[in-house]
Amino acid sequence: MASPDLETLLEVQEHDTVLDQLRHRKATIPERAQLADLEARADGLRGQLTEAGAARDEVVKQQEGLEADLAAAEKRMKEIEQRLFSPTAGVRDMEAMNDELSSLKRRRSSLEDQVLEALEAREPLDAAVEKLEAALAGIASEVASLEDVIAEAELVIEAEIDVEQSKRDAAATGVPEQLAQQYERLRSRLGGIGAARLVGTSCSGCHLTLPATEIDRIKKAPPDAFFTCDQCGRILVVS
Ligand SMILES: [Zn+2]
């Protein structure tokens, strides 16, 4: 039997290992990976939406410009038509006005064609924007439900962590300060394991067999003697 301090330290180690596993479980809740995938997909779609939106806005701008030109042409045509029927219009004026009216009619027809073309060009862009917005809304709702699942899983794990942490803290009060400090140093350097039991002739920290001379020295030492593993440097708890 090792000194009670070392047995207590090993108990602390066991709680620390469980705590590490719980923290790892919390960090690697499976839904987190799904969430990251969804967020990456949403990023891609947002990029596409920005492009499609810009292309659509450009066509809308063209369409609005053409519609404004069309409205101006129609307004001018109405003005001329009113003047044509006015009794004060002279023959030469009427000729000039008829010429302008013909030209305005041609312009109107061309503008109408161009507005139609803009509307046709806009149609697939509107559809693309709508499709991307719908896909993003779908992802947003999936993200929200995954976040709920993750939050719930976190709560469960955090409760387990709290329980384990209390047990750990209670056990740690039985470990002398200097030993605790050495343990923490080793633990942070050696993948979370600072103290290990000697099982047979091997260290359960590094799983290597200790040299026969070292085993002999340990066996002959008083029960409260302090050893570290020759191979990995961890605090060795001898049963
Ligand atoms: Zn070792």
Image: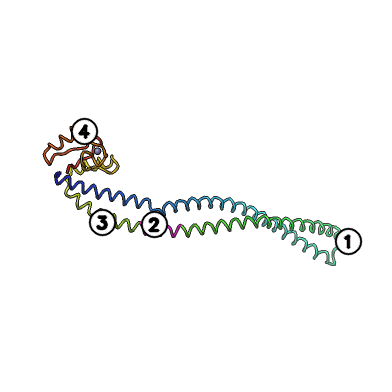
Secondary structure found at label 4:
loop
Residue 143, how many percent across, how many down?
45, 57
The residue depicted at 34 percent of the width and 52 percent of the height is 25
Q: Quadrant of the N terminus?
A: top left
Which of the two discs, 1 and 4, labels the residue nearer the N terminus? 1
Residues at marks 3 and 1, CA–CA distance in whole angstroms: 103 Å
Which of the two discs, 2 and 3, labels the residue nearer the N terminus? 2
Is residue 3 found left or right of 121 in the rendered image? left
The reply to whether dot 2 and dot 3 touch (C-beta < 8 Å) is no
If the picture is divided into quarters, which one holds ligand 1?
Answer: top left
Rate crowding at label 3 as few (under 14), some (14 to 19) or many (20 or more) other CA atoms within 10 Å.
Answer: few
Secondary structure found at label 1:
helix
Mark 1 sits on what residue? 91
Q: Which mark is residue 211?
A: 4
Task: Magenta stretch: give its range.
Answer: 143-153
> Which of the two marks, 3 or 1, is nearer to us in this view?
3
> Which of the two marks, 2 or 4, is nearer to us in this view?
4
Residues at marks 2 and 3, CA–CA distance in whole angstroms: 20 Å
Secondary structure found at label 2:
helix
Queried whether the magenta region covers residue 48, the answer comes back as no
The residue depicted at 45 percent of the width and 51 percent of the height is 36
The reply to whether dot 4 and dot 3 touch (C-beta < 8 Å) is no
Vertical order, 213 against 157 (above or below) = above
Q: Amino acid at mark 3?
A: Val
Is residue 23 found left or right of 68 in the rendered image? left
